[in-house]
Image (cartoon, rainbow, N blue to C red):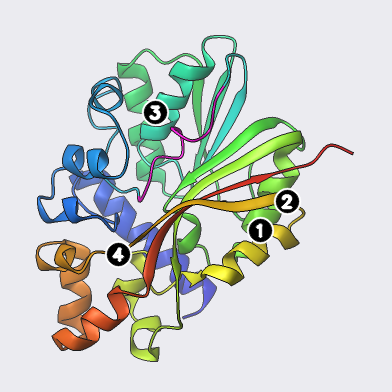
Amino acid sequence: MKETEIKKNVRKSYASVAKQSTSCCAPTTSCCSNPSEAISKAIGYSEHEISSVPEGANLGLGCGNPVALASLKEGETVLDLGSGAGFDCFLAAQRVGEKGKVIGVDMTPEMVDKARENALEGNSHNVEFRLGEIENLPVADNSADIVISNCVINLSPDKPRVFKEAFRVLKPGGRLMVSDIVLLKELPTFIINSVSAYVGCISGAMLKDEYLATIKSAGFNDVKILEENVFPIDCMANDPTAQAIIKELKMPEDKIMDFANSVLSVRVQAKKVRH
């Protein structure tokens, strides 16, 4: 698929999610029960975190909890790549306090509108949402203390540029903390070319070693995986994204098992070293 086609399909899909508030990109067994709250608990969010954000901010689209791993400090500036309805942004805002700032960037207008509505509802003064692409961030150089992202970078057709942009906007000494989907082996061509599989955070994912190498090539140091989990096959039963893939591709069960076992959810940390 061409880059413009990929972005068009991703934007269309997530605009629909913003309007309906139902979807699942998270590779967790909780997808089977579908509610966003159950999904979020399964990938590392506490009940307190889930209940502390404005209603409608949590769409259950993540594959990890980057905020829990970020060690945020009061007064820091946080940038969230692909911020959606603002779930991680609102959690980060609580940690950095009124002296801190959180910026969410998303390319889907409907998501940005929803996030801004949630910010008003939650009276979140230290959070702002900007419409833009994560390959071309509308953010100044050396302005963020930390960049977070949750199951979004895999959707980009130009991941090297995303990490270069993240490096650009981070202050010297800043850090990158992302949750994302990676692969243990190359996927079959019929999955790679599937629109449903791309939007579902699968066919656009990189090989794990390639993903880490891409982060290093952008200039980051101390790149490491803090946690990884295999995409659970039982999630396939009821997850709408998985069902769309199965229906579109008419995949037999043995092939589903094979490719699902090669898909990982990872939490990655990296640093922009001071010079």
Q: Dot 3 surroundings within 10 Å: few (below 14), some, or many (20 or more)?
A: many
Placement of 105 over or under 52, stated as above or below = below
* Residue to which mark 3 is pinned: 116
Give the mark toward the camera: 3 or 4.
4
Earlier in the chain: of badge 2 and badge 4, it is 2
Residue 15: mark: none
Q: Secondary structure at mark 1?
A: helix
Q: Secondary structure at mark 4?
A: loop
Q: Earlier in the sequence, mark 3 or mark 4?
A: 3
Which residue sits at x=55%, y=46%? 132
Q: Amino acid at mark 4?
A: Phe
The residue sitting at 14% across, 65% down in the picture is 234
Q: Which residues are magenta?
A: 63-72
Tell me how far mark 3 sits from mark 2, CA to CA. 31 Å
Foreground of the two, 274 or 249: 274
SS label for mark 3: helix
Q: Mark 3 vs mark 2: which is more N-terminal?
A: 3
Q: Nearer the viewer, residue 271 or 197?
A: 271
Q: For the point 46% across and 83% down, which residue is it?
A: 186
Q: How crowded is the residue under tag 1: few (<14 C-alpha within 10 Å), some, or many (20+)? A: many
Q: Residue at label 1?
A: 215
Residue hosting label 4: 231
Residue with the mark numbered 2: 220
Q: 23 left or right of 168? A: left
Q: Are marks 2 and 1 in contact (CB under 8 Å)?
A: yes
Q: Main secondary structure of the magenta part?
A: loop
Residue 195 visible in the shown view: yes
Disc 3 and disc 1 in contact, CB within 8 angstroms: no
